Amino acid sequence: MTGDERIPRARGLSTWTTRRWLRVGVAVSLTVLALLGVTGAWILGRTASISDSLVDVKSPALTTSIRLESALLNQETGIRGYGLTGTPDFLKPYRQGLADQKTYTATLSELLQGDRAGLRDLRAVQDAVETWQDRFARPIAASPAGAPSALATERAAEGKTAFDKVRASMATQQDGLRSGRVRARADLASTMKVRNWLFSAIAVLIAVLAGVVFDALRRGITSPLERLGADARAVADGDFARPITPTGPADLRQLSGEIDSMRQRLVRELEFSEEARLRLDEQSTELQRSNAELEQFAYVASHDLQEPLRKVSSFTQLLQRRYGGQLDDRADQYIDFAVDGANRMQTLINDLLEFSRVGRVHHAHQSVDLNAVMKRSLSALSVGIEEAGAVITRDELPTLVADPTQMGMLWQNLIGNAVKFRRPQEAPKIHVSAEQDGGLWKFTVTDNGIGIAPEYAEKVFVIFQRLHTKDAYHGSGIGLAMCRKIVEFHGGTIFVDPEYTGGTRITFTLAGEPSETGLPSAAPEEERPAVPPTP
């Protein structure tokens, strides 16, 4: 076979999958084992057949032949004694011999079925016995008892010759049976020798076959899988530059190729992720710088705005006190507008500063008893609660890891809103409940106030969003926005329950541990450099 002829065959074998290799290997192994099993069964059957023939036919036939000879000798002895003496007792062994002859002859006929030579010898014995009995035994046995038989004396020589033929035929038969037994023993010995050699060869062949199968599995499956596993572990440990070497059958090589494709994709994804991370780091750095500038701007702006607002408020109030009543009503109204606007702007700036400080200045997470925080909040709101005649009830509140200042701001805004947005001529009734829901705590603040329409359920949490005019309800529109910021800073959510129609029910959750996103990104306000007020 030329090299060009071997290449297509090699390529054909290289396309075989693990399943095909296993099927071919199993088929070949089963074929070899079947052939070995058939050969072993044949040799075992041959050994058993020879052994059975020797034990059940050859040896019993020789023994029966010897017994048949003994029965014939008993007949000859009994007839000869009866013929010489006429004593009836001599006929007993003769008659017993006849019965034994019949039995042994039938046994031999059965044992020698299929043995032509043995049956031929048996017929020769039967013919010789029949001749002796016809010419000598039966006539003498029929002679009257009490006196010697003249026929015995007359046919003595003939009887001896006839019985000698019986002896000769018996000897021939027994020699044939002995020869057959000897041949059977020799055949059994040689067959057992072949059997032993065959089973030894079968054992060696099975061991070789097992070794071949084991080596084939090791080379074709185990080693490629071990190499694939080693490469995969190396990639999993971070060596993404290590290629996956395809080895073994076609399907294992395909699997190696797919894993290598996945590795290459991971490499591309990691490169992209690294680039994205670098961009995010740059953006984060820029964002931190921008936040620091915005915080500095808010800090400076708050101080710079406070001073002119105080001046505007102070001078307009002085103008009101000095010239009140001296000007017309429209001038007094303008002065009132200016004083009110300055005060509201000052309140708005203070609220905006408090909103910006949530999660930035107040971030001292610690174990906080919300019952104690609630008591302090109610004490701070005691004047408004007393004026409104509000009735406040609450469940037992838990102890959580949170910022105590922010928790106080949360309760003050929620309770303060429930007291402020009450129905006219109706005392506020407020209930605070708490229940654990998995890893979170669920709180509700329920009141009997004016309520919030479903279409405004999200709008109320947006900063500076007001649903009423400042003449109806005072405030800056920051309270609920600050509540959402505090709750989300502590890993929870807050929303208005749209199914409650008897007032307003605000539900929020708090985590037992602080949120990772709640960490401040800038220095606390105490560490910032003081900015002198504008003169």
Image (tube, grey):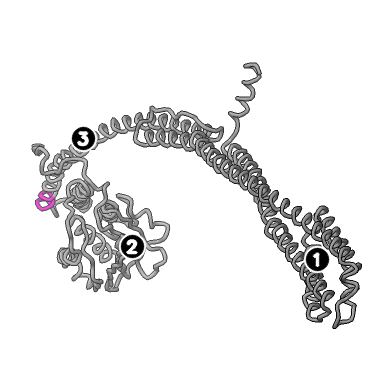
Camera-nearest label, 1 or 2? 1
Which residue is found at the position 80% from the left and 69% from the top? 76
Residue shown at 90% from the left, 69% from the top: 154
Q: Nearer the viewer, residue 88 or 110?
A: 88
Q: Which residue is mark 1?
A: 105
Residue 299 in the figure: left or right of residue 20 = left
Question: Which amino acid type corresponds to the residue marked 2 in the rendered image?
Answer: Gly
Q: Is residue 156 visible?
A: yes
Query: How crowded is the residue under tag 2: few (<14 C-alpha within 10 Å), some, or many (20+)?
Result: few
**CA separation in Å, label 3 and label 1:** 131 Å
Does 322 lie within the magenta span? yes
Q: Which mark is residue 438?
A: 2
Measured as percent of width and height from the top left, residue 107 is found at: 78, 66
Q: CA distance from mark 2 to mark 3?
A: 40 Å
Tag 3: amino acid: Glu
Residue 101 magenta-drawn? Answer: no
Residue with the most extreme bottom position: 146
Q: For mark 1, give the secondary structure.
A: helix
Mark 1 Cα-neighbour bin, 10 Å: few <14, some 14–19, many ≥20: many
- Total numbered labels: 3
Is tag 2's residue or tag 3's residue first in the polypeptide sequence? 3
Near-viewer residue (39 or 15): 39
Q: Is residue 256 above or below residue 425?
A: above
The magenta segment = 317-323
* Residue indicated by mark 3: 293
